[in-house]
Amino acid sequence: MQFEEYQSAAKQTALYPNRLKNLEYPTLGLAGEAGEVANIVKKIQRDFGGEITDEIRAKLKDELGDVLWYISACADELGLTLEEIVHFNVEKLAKRHGK
């Protein structure tokens, strides 16, 4: 699936107040989901001696998908595409590394 296809599909499931006029809602959701990812990683260190099991990998896959959904929703709120964000980021990183 391409970024454009994902963003379009994700947009169809975005049901929150004042859609396309409410950057706060998806931003807070993004922070919450990123926190869930961080919490799982913390528990890998605390409870599993740093080992990533198949079950943990599946949980992270699920939570990272939620993070991606909220990034897509934030992009929609700003009138951006994921494709634009990806290209901008790659160019920024290349400049940072002198390329």
Image (cartoon, helix red, strand yellow):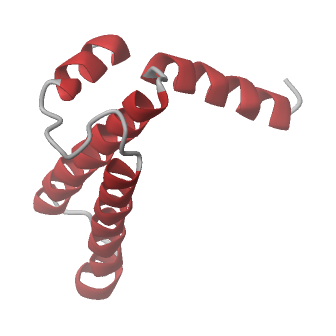
Image quarter where the C terminus lies is: top right
Residue at (35%, 60%) from the top-left corner? 28
| Residue 20, image x, y percentages | 34, 33
Residue at (55%, 18%) from the top-left corner? 84
| Residue 95, image x, y percentages | 83, 29
Front in this rendered view, residue 68 or 45: 68
Residue at (31%, 53%) from the top-left corner? 25
Relative horizontal placement of residue 87, taking residue 63 as reference (left or right): right
Please determine whether, in this image, residue 29 is positioned above or below residue 91: below
Residue at (27%, 70%) from the top-left corner? 40
| Residue 66, image x, y percentages | 23, 47
Please determine whether, in this image, residue 45 is positioned above or below residue 69: below
Relative horizontal placement of residue 56, taking residue 83 as reference (left or right): left
- Quarter of the image for residue 86 reads top right
- Quarter of the image for residue 2 reads top left
Please determine whether, in this image, residue 26 is positioned above or below residue 12: below
Image quarter where the N terminus lies is: top left
| Residue 65, image x, y percentages | 24, 42
Front in this rendered view, residue 21 or 15: 21
Please determine whether, in this image, residue 7 is positioned above or below residue 92: above
Q: Residue furthest toward the right?
A: 98
Front in this rendered view, residue 83 or 37: 83
Report the label total: 0
Q: Residue furthest toward the bottom?
A: 46
Front in this rendered view, residue 92 or 81: 81
Relative horizontal placement of residue 97, taking residue 81 as reference (left or right): right
